[in-house]
Image (cartoon, rainbow, N blue to C red):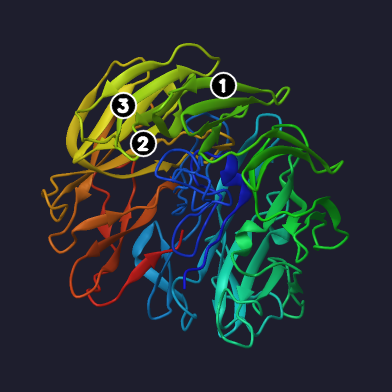
Amino acid sequence: MKIRWSLFLVAFLLVAVMAFTFTGCASDEGGSDETTTSNDDAGDDGSDGDAGDDGSDGDGGNGDSDGSGGASSATYLFYSDENGDIYAVDPENLMSRQLVDSGITTDEEVGNYYAGTYNSANNTISDWHKRYVLYFKDGRIYKVSALKSDSLTPIQVSSEIGAIDLCDSRGNEDVANIDNSVFIYTISGTDGECDTSDDIVKMGTLGMSSTDAPKILNVTASYYERFIRSIYNMSDLSIAGFLMINLNSDLVECDTGFSNCITVKTSVSEIWSRYYVPNSNIIIVEIDEDIYTYDWTTNTLTSIYVSFSGSYISDGSAMYFEDGSKIFRINYNDFSVTELVDEGTNDIVGIALTNNKVVYKVGSPLGPASVMKVVPKAGGAATTIMTVESGESINYVYATADSHIYYTRGKALGHIKDDGSGLSEINARYAGRIRFTTTLRLYHDFPDRILRLEGCADDGDCAGATLKSFDAATYSNELILGTLPDDINNIDIESGHGNPLLGGWWRSSSKFTDDIFFVDVTKSNSLQRITNSPSLDERVIH
């Protein structure tokens, strides 16, 4: 059983900062292996995976490189293990870890909530920091403050006592009031099995006391993440209500208590909220593979594109998506749809954005993506900037500000600019990307540093490899962070927001087990081992 936490804001973030799962980041809108989010909604943006891909590993006391915002609130870093223990780590005192609780249902059933101060004028959130850890234990739900100034004593949230056979769960932060942040979870019914007709979906808020009962929702339990979407008021990023597909297959808009529901569309199978249009009440949503705009204040649904089946990304002024062999732009000023690219019989595989261009890969149907191209966001001729040999594939691709593009090809980690200059490849393994400034930019928030492992063996074993980071915006300022121990053969740093952070490294034995390491991506030789437990699997709480 894997429990997923996800949050809408990753729908328009480049990094998966506001999305979380119990074992990593997952977006409310999904993810792929690109810097865009696929139609499958599995983790990520633009969710890098971007998001999804990508996870929020904790927060230190770093100032903002862009000068917008002060130091982050001082917080603990957290991890759990397969015995059901949760630990807090003080970045200023790494070896003095504190046991928060023990006996949780499983170490996967843990997630984070983040907080900050929203500025609607420039669409940023300052002092973005981990605020609570939420977890399930003995059928109950608990939260623990992540602030170093608070107690680490767990607090029971809601009167729930029956969340033992937990099937699925997600969280949605209310940035205006953290206590109004919601958690929605599914428990199995009398048959004890998940994804069956008697499953029960419930909702609670972080501000609930131990005597407040969670609300049972009138929604299909199986894969319910495809049936509920939060509505956010873009003036303050408060949760204003929900879009939900009820048991009659009607898409309805409900208030924050899942009451007073108004029918928006009948005969609906699934819904994904894609992007919120800045400074408006408009949401771009995908309903049964068609794209619509929805004004949640007037309940107005307008179709703008049919039969969408690709990935997408936004820069705050437009949404870009690929559909088969074509790339389109949806303009936010009038919601017109403009075709930017048509590759004919070839397939477009994922898209990413630099400041002025759309980056994409091209391959033959069912074949490898062997060509990388760019097209101006404003329209114009597409340009080939890279081609690899027949049979090879350009894999993971993402872009940053100042025209830099990073990709993987075989055992190489590559860099090229969106004008075709600056091509460089080294024999290294991509190890993550981190956004650590404490002011979060909505819609297209580029990473600050990129991590790579140098010295891995041909079979992928990275024991003894060197972990490095470099500046993503300039492809410079390389730092050596440390060396992987000989008994650790790979790295698992969830890309996302926060520094310093914890990462999981795993060894191969009779089973794969993670140990916990600490790293500050801005400081040389900062890699430190926190645990050494060959027989115990441990997980960073993102």
Q: CA distance from mark 3 to mark 1?
A: 20 Å
Q: On screen, 404 above or below 500? A: above
188 sits to left or right of 239 = left
Mark 1 vs 2, N-terminal side: 1
Q: Position of residue 330 (x, y in %)?
A: 63, 27
Instruction: Find residue 371 and name its label.
Output: 3
Dot 3 falls on a residue whose secondary structure is strand
224 sits to left or right of 74 = right
Report whether residue 413 is seen.
yes
Of all residues shown, which one is farthest toward the front? 345
Q: Position of residue 120 (x, y in %)?
A: 71, 34
Q: Image quadrant of residue 136?
A: bottom right
Q: On screen, 82 above or below 338? A: below
392 sits to left or right of 29 = left
Q: Position of residue 279 (x, y in %)?
A: 74, 32
Location of mark 2 (residue): 365
526 sits to left or right of 188 = left
Q: CA distance from mark 1 to mark 2?
A: 21 Å
Dot 1 falls on a residue whose secondary structure is strand
Of all residues shown, which one is farthest toward the bottom? 190
Instruction: Find residue 339 and name its label.
Output: 1
